[in-house]
Each structure stands twice: as structure tokens, then as C-alpha cells.
Amino acid sequence: MTRQLLLADELLLVAVNPRTGRLTVSPRLMGFGLGAAVLGELILDGYLSVSPTGMVEWLPQMSDRHPRDPLGYKVAHQVATEARSRPLEQWLRVLSLNDIRRDVGQRMVQSGLISPPARTGISRQYAYRTVAAADQWWWWQRIRDFLTLPGRELPEIGDLCLLGIADAIGLRPSLLRDTPAEAVRILDGTREMPGPPGHLIRHTHVLTASQALS
């Protein structure tokens, strides 16, 4: 099952209830997760790096080309024009405050993946529904298959990033429901990935854990 969505788009679909389209984690955690996922898109495409200490840096060799995705371009431009490097945790707070959830939702609407988000229920939470109803379940099941059917297909690095960020924002219980013991090893292993993707996941965990304690 090859990845066909951008990382943040798929994270949003994984983080909503397939029946209702409403978030299964808090909006704050979702903002951190989507910020990490957009930065992850730029890391996987070679525009950004994250150091072991969590500093996010623009890679100067990429200055002659830019992300084709407008949201990726906007975030990459923010990082590239900073006078000095910022830690990942600070970037996730900035992106969350700048309503990265709205930006990702708009990108998904423009690509024809979801209908415009609408407030539903007594709580008036936004619901994110795919244009094709079956897709709401398909994307959730796609990532779950890596855990329920371990060994059938090795996750690609983007899928491991998706699993790691989903775990960091509190989706571990739903991801691991009715899975074999091997699934825990796969999920825990996302924190041990080498290089910038692993640093991204570990420092996202640090931020979300600190929010749980505050």
C-alpha cells in the first residue's frame, strides 16, 4: 500500500473518527502533530533537517528550488528566513498558533480529498469528511495494517514518520487495539529511527509529553 497522500493530510484522516469525522485528540495536540507532519514533509523531501538536539535548519543547497505545495513553501520560507535556528518544539508551537490545522484542511479541500470542514454536534467541533465516504475508512485501515499484519509489508520511512507522530499525539491506544505483540515493537521503533526523521519524532514526543504534565 504505497503512500499517496502528503504526511499531514494522512495524519489528519488517521486522527479523526471514521464515522463522525471529528478529531479523536485535542485540537492543541492535533496542531502540534500537523506542524510536525508538515515539517516532516519538508524533511523527507530534503528541504529541512533536524539536529539531535532538536534544532530545525533550512538546507542551503536547496535554495535554488522550492516546494511545489503552497503550504510546504510557506513553512519552508518561514524557516529559511529566520535569523537563527529554532528548536523543533518552538516551531510546533508557532505553527499550531498560526492554525496549521486550518491550513492543512484547506489544502485537503483544494485537492478534492475532503469536503469543507463543518461544525457538528453540541460541541460544534469541526468534522473532516472525505469526498468519497469509503476513503474515510481506507486511510485509517492502511496505517493500521502495518500493525495488525506485521511483516506483510515493511513500512516506508514516511509511514514510520506517520506512525511516530500519531503515537506522539496520543493515538497509541487506537493504533494498538487488537494488534499482535509485534505491533508495540514497530510503534516503539519509530522513536529509534536514525537521522532527522527520528529526531523529529523524538522531539515531538518531548513536547506532547510536557503538555500532558502541564
Image (cartoon, helix red, strand yellow):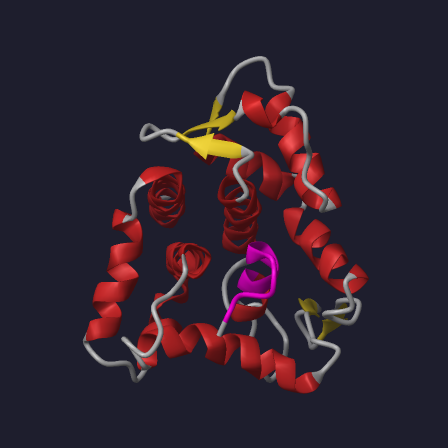
Residue 90, given in percent of the width and then of the height, sits at 49, 31
Look at the image and give the residue range highlighted in magenta.
2-11
Residue 39 within the segment the image draws in magenta:
no
Residue 131, given in percent of the width and then of the height, sits at 75, 78
Residue at (55% x, 56% y) in the render: 7
- The front one of 95 and 140 is 140
Residue 184, given in percent of the width and then of the height, sits at 23, 68
Residue 200 lies in quadrant: top left
Question: Is residue 184 rendered to the left or right of residue 170?
Answer: left
Viewport quadrant of the C terminus: top left
Residue 9 within the segment the image draws in magenta:
yes
Residue 177 lies in quadrant: bottom left
Q: Is residue 76 above or below residue 179?
A: above
Q: Is residue 97 above or below residue 116?
A: above
Residue at (41% x, 60% y) in the render: 156
Residue at (25% x, 48% y) in the render: 192
Residue at (34% x, 68% y) in the render: 154
